[in-house]
Amino acid sequence: MKFTLSWLKDHLETAAPLDDILYALTDLGLEVEEVSDPAATLGAFTIARVIEAAQHPDADRLRLCRVATWPNGPDGASEEVQVVCGAPNARSGLVGVFAPIGTHVPGTGVDLKPGVIRGQASNGMLCSERELMLSDAHDGIIELPEDAPLGVRYIDYAGLNDPMIYIKITPNRPDALGVRGVARDLAARGLGTLKPLSVTAVPGEFPCPVPVSIDADVRARGCPLFAGRVIRGVRNGPSPAWLQQRLRAIGLRPISALVDITNFFTFDQNRPLHVFDAARLTGGLRVHAAQGTEALAALDDKTYTLRTGDMLISDDSGPQSIAGIMGGAPSGCGEDTVDVFLESAYWDPITIAATGRALKINSDARYRFERGIDPAFTLDGLELATRMILDLCGGTASDVAQAGAVPDTTRSYPFDPARVVRLVGMDIPAATQRASLQALGFTVDDTSATPPSWRPDILGSADLVEEVARIASLTKLVGKPLPRTQAGVPKPVLTLVQQREILARRTLATLGYNESVTYSFIDGPSAALFGGGDDAVRLDNPISSEMSHMRPDLLPGLLQAASRNQARGAMDLALFEVGPAFTGGEPGDQHLQATGLLVGATAPRDPYGSRRNADVYDAKADAEAVLAAIKAPARVQIGRNVPAWFHPGRAGQMTLGPKLVLATFGEVHPKVLKALDVKGPAVAFTVLLENPPLPKTRSLARPALAANSLQAVERDFAFVVDAGVEALTLINAAAGADKALIDGVRLFDEFTGERAAAQMGDGKKSLAITVRLQPRDATLTEAEIEAASARIIEKVNKATGGTLRG
């Protein structure tokens, strides 16, 4: 929404400086995007007199002009410069607009410098209106009256020193799409007084020869009111200078008086209007729904085919206007227009928005109608526009032809001044609240408030509170701590699962992973690779074809991110994400995951040859680190029943018992890497944060340090077991021999191959472990150590069939 300061002051009686107005607009929610100050572009142009204009000695169409640039030079005389000018009206005694050396001429984009034209010096420029971007006139330089004050800035003399203000309008404020609505907000804030708007009906001098009607189905849905009148004998020439200047200031091109008047009311009162050339109409005008075959050549020189149900304004010969959006060229007004039909109607916002989107038409009328204008101002706008047409174009007006009636938008909501404190936290006196609402046009009594017809966005009591707080200024809101409901330390706010999420994220970042935040939506083929992609997780209205399904796992998003990074030359990656994955469309069909992905090498190249590719044990170690951080049970089983997107034989699952899965780790299957265009090898892990049993306490904080001053004892054992025995089975068996005494078990050697078979027999291998014994009460004796060792041997033998290696 654009307007000038002088335009605003047509509706607002104020002495507030521009900076105060700009601050108040933004504070009221009408954010100022841009302020265009003419002084910045035209401030250097001054009024000057041509003392003498002589013929250029070397050019027939050029003249040498002695120009007096201001009346009071250092010695009391005018300062003179020579200007070479090619304008046909350049003559002695002419008073015009002068641009000195160094001035930027906006119409040409040239910065003036001293020059020599056909052998004669030229120091400045006498300007036309086009060079100042005031109009397209360029047939001569500007001519001013003889008494125009020399040396004065032209913008001050011509009244052009009028800043243009551009504000952003949110969709809920259609009333601010008119200058009067903006002025009303400023008046309510206290920056002035809203000037009264007088609407006097123009008496008709003859019956309207163009009858109007609305089809019953359209009146009930799309157009409750359609009105207009014929004005005969108009002169559709150029609009007055003040109107052209006002439209140019906001970026509109003046066309003709009739069109300029309708554009003026669109921005002045948020009242779009339309004028038809009455001579080009056949019969009356009818508002109806399109059948789906109608086509109309519009005023933007494009032809549009209407959909079934779109609203049209037609006469007996066919469509003449796309209702509420754009008029048709066949009945458009031109210089030869003598009789016009001036139309003012109220259109349903949803219908206008749907038609405008379908036809891809963006017009000022559509922009306002689809947001909701003031239905009660429909007839008043018609009367005001009629009066301006009669004043500027002459003619005589007919009676008003009207179909339908002004829709009743009256509604009231409870008004409780105390609610402002509850919802906003601002203590505003009740009298001030009522005064603010009344200044905005609300009708307020002791218990309720009725919004004005131009505020369709007010739909409840909370909106009344918003208006009061907006006018009072939310910058006055003072921060206050929430009152405590109980004494002492407050209870924890985060649930245990939320604490686990934070700990997992912190742990993975500490391990050197980079966090990724990917979309919860992925494409169907990628979802199918990870066990998803069915109709239960398909979106009805996806953002794009690449975001059609809810993700069944975090890994596809990380692999796609890895592919994009590799395409840009980053080959060694460590990425992680913590977030939900989905198995269905119901609220309970989602679970929280922490997933990590390692692609490429674990370290950069160095001269010592320590670089290696990430392997399954890196993924296993990082998954264990996350489980340890969230206080999951330390002793888990490793199963081989892994999902299909992991490499069989190079992946595993950490479980409690046969069914409760805590984490999955391993190499990503080559076919998955190929499908997602990732250059391997790649290893990954997924920790299911909700699956580990919850601890008895609500805290996941680190337990108190249990220091022990007694010397620990370590004993090494080497067991001969069958080649198929897993090392973890042996470790768990040894650790369970004495849970109170054994502090840790670690595998440190594995002896396999032909030499092992030669020493221990075919199908055998040797696993060597270190067992750490930590006494609690007294130093261990040799007998206690031997007894513990015997229990370890016995447990391992029972669990694996292993015997001590000789």
Image: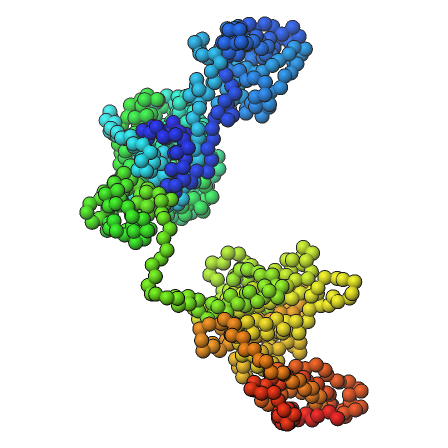
User: How far across and how far down the image is residue 456, in percent?
Assistant: 31, 45
Taking the image as shown, residue 141 lies to the left or right of residue 570, namely left
Outermost residue on the left side: it is 446
Can residue 546 be seen from the camera position used here? yes
Task: Say if 7 sits above or below 686 in the image.
Answer: above
User: How far across and how far down the image is residue 87, in percent?
Assistant: 56, 13
Q: In front: 408, or 424?
A: 424
On the rendered image, what quadrant is the C terminus found in? bottom right
Residue sitting at x 40%, y 23%: 242
Taking the image as shown, residue 677 lies to the left or right of residue 396, namely right
Residue 753's quadrant in the figure? bottom right
Residue sitting at x 50%, y 26%: 40
Q: How many marks?
A: 0
Task: Say if 639 sits above or below 493 in the image.
Answer: below
User: How far across and how far down the image is residue 520, in percent?
Assistant: 52, 62
On the rendered image, what quadrant is the N terminus found in? top left
User: How far across and how far down the image is residue 461, in percent?
Assistant: 28, 51
Task: Say if 6 sits above or below 721 in the image.
Answer: above
Q: How is the image coloured?
A: rainbow
Can residue 277 be seen from the camera position used here? no
Taking the image as shown, residue 701 lies to the left or right of residue 611, namely left
Residue sitting at x 56%, y 9%: 80
Residue sitting at x 64%, y 87%: 730
Q: In front: 427, or 236?
A: 427
